[in-house]
Image: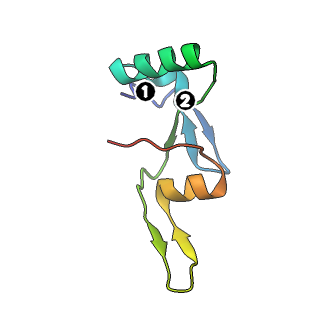
Amino acid sequence: MIWTLATAFFDETTQIFDVTKSTKGMFYDLFMVLQEKLNFTATLNKRKDSQWGIAKVLSNGTVITSGIHADVAKGDADMIVAR
């Protein structure tokens, strides 16, 4: 659960909030344990527009993405999680 965006850093270029320090809850706690045990670091982000988006494959093989799918395609995110 994101408890506040007031203190979250906002990146004007990507239109994404860094909510790493503004998150709490059971899933966040589990994610922190995974980071420690598997030795990786991550930031948690929230899109300003909150769009899930789509990933559509055209007949010529071109992939068109929007929303959180586009974040992965552009390299702004390595993984997406939604509920």
- Numbered disc total: 2
| Disc 1 target residue | 4
C-alpha gap between disc 2 and disc 1: 7 Å
Asked if the residue under mark 1 is in contact with the one under mark 2, i.e. CB atoms within 8 Å, the reply is: yes
**Amino acid under disc 1:** Thr
- Display colour scheme: rainbow
Residue lying farthest to the front in this orientation? 38
Residue behind mark 2: 8
Image quarter where the N terminus lies is top left
Q: Give the residue displayed 58% in from the left and 78% down from the top.
A: 62
Label 2 amino acid? Ala
> Residue at (48%, 58%) from the top-left corner?
67
Residue under the image location 63 percent in, 18 percent down:
39
Place of residue 32 in the rendered image (x, y in percent of width and height, measured from the top left): 50, 17
Q: Secondary structure at mark 2?
A: loop
Q: Position of residue 40 (x, y in %)?
A: 63, 23
In the depicted structure, whether residue 81 falls above or below residue 57? above
